[in-house]
Amino acid sequence: MTKVALVFRTIGERTSERALELAREHIRPDEELVLSDCRPFTEAVARMVAHEYASDLVVAVDADCLILEDLRPFLEADDRPYVDCYVFDRFRGRLHCGVHITRADVMRKMRDVVPPELDPAYVLRPESRLRKLALNALGEIKCFKGFHILHDHLQWRRDVWAKYALRELRSRTPEQRRRLDAAVERWAETDDLELRVAFEGVRWARREVPEDAPPNVLSEVIASLPARGAGELAALGIEELPELSRAEVDAYARAHAERHPPRTERYPVFGLGLSRTGTRSLTSALHTIGIDAIHYPVDEDTFRALETGTLDFRFMGAFDGITDITAAPYYAQLDRRYPDAKFILTVREEEAWLRSCHNHWLGRDPFEVPTSPGRDTHLRIRRFLRAAVYGTYRFEPERFRWVYREHVDAVRRHFAGRPDKLLVMDIAGGDGWEPLCAFLGRPVPQQVFPHKGGVLSQRMLAETDDADD
């Protein structure tokens, strides 16, 4: 039986007591660490990673998260190094935030990481930055899983203001800015008071904090936001909410479940696109509409499934599919093994794809000396899949061009006459929610289509400083 530690983090959110009740009910932890009013957040992170855990998994839950689903079955089956949970966010839609499932060895490695000085990524997202550095050191990667969790619903309005002032500071990259701008545009179209408060927080940060503010200034601003929120609400003439009851939470949760019923029809979904064709964007989009695919898994079980040719991916019991070259060369076998599966082939303009592949493969030596068992497994999978898909360990443009054309043609031929089984998407060229949701029978979400890894349409490229890499 898996031992699970609950780390609950609160700085006085309106949902704190109710969130802790729900976390205990739906995680049933073997040990608990409650971190109350740890400010700044770097202090909460430091205390979390310094703790000596007796458990196999550590589930960190922020007090702005209301867990409405039993997580224990997944925790018993899960051995991913890190799972970032998709939630229903009050202001921005479906996204990953607020609940994090971390294996104990990753948590110990986070403790060993020396916090980087004057690093904006650490200042803005200290937990995320430490975990990323720890995963890199272990040769592991994160994955995502969706649950029925409400994030940022029923909060103090002063906290909403402060949080969205901070969100603006965290959104100063082209992709993050694009996503936040799309949300702000929706807020402007409603008379929802909480959305107005969030809008005012964003507007304040854009007005008062320069884009080029150094890390020390950002730290000072972030530390001032909680106290500033109440004053800003008073200046706006907006009243605060009363204390939150469990009855209010339960009624709100029932209404939310009626508006967002869970996906009842379950079937595997496999992304067959080659690397750098928008596979990460596709994965994120699938999670947004409730389909939990793993992008390029690099664990020992995956390697055994590949090298034995069985394609017996153990994680398919808890997840809905795979994207990237882990699945790409095996479309025929996966089609036979999973007769109800759906397949998505991502394509891209050839020259742009070749440039992206060239840049992507630079510095990714398949024969580097591994520094950990996880890194060794990662490299074995890298070598195996490069050989299986491209027939080479190194980037060679004409070989890649030939492989790309052959792969796209072969997949199209295999699924010819079965439009219900295969969708071809040019995400870099602008394909988005409409074809994907129509193919999978899912409602179109009211949020922008995700673009990861520099895969942007020509229109978006013209609006940003991103290079096509």
Image: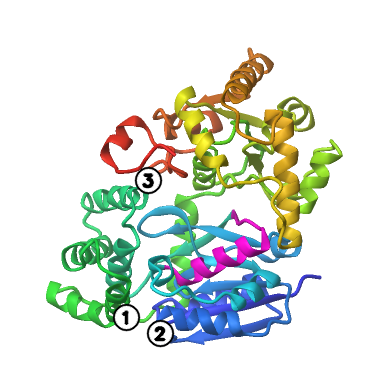
- Amino acid at circle 2: Arg
Residue bearing mark 2? 39
Residue bearing mark 3? 447
- Amino acid at circle 1: Ala
Q: Which mark is residue 223?
A: 1
The quadrant in which residue 279 appears is top right
**C-beta proximity under 8 Å, tags 2 and 1:** yes
Q: Gap between marks 3 and 1, in whole Å?
A: 30 Å
Residue name at image x 38 percent, y 69 percent: 154
Q: Earlier in the sequence, mark 3 or mark 1?
A: 1
Picture layout, residue 171 above or below residue 25: above
Q: Earlier in the sequence, mark 3 or mark 2?
A: 2
Q: Gap between marks 3 and 2, in whole Å?
A: 32 Å
Any magenta on residue 24? no
Left or right of residue 231: residue 103: right
Q: Gap between marks 2 and 1, in whole Å?
A: 8 Å
Residue name at image x 21 percent, y 56 percent: 191
Of 259 and 412, nearer the camera is: 412
**C-beta proximity under 8 Å, tags 3 and 1:** no
Magenta stretch bounds: 125-144
- Tag 1's secondary structure? helix
Picture layout, residue 211 above or below residue 434: below
- Tag 3's secondary structure? loop
Any magenta on residue 135? yes
Of 94 and 129, nearer the camera is: 129
Residue name at image x 40 percent, y 66 percent: 152
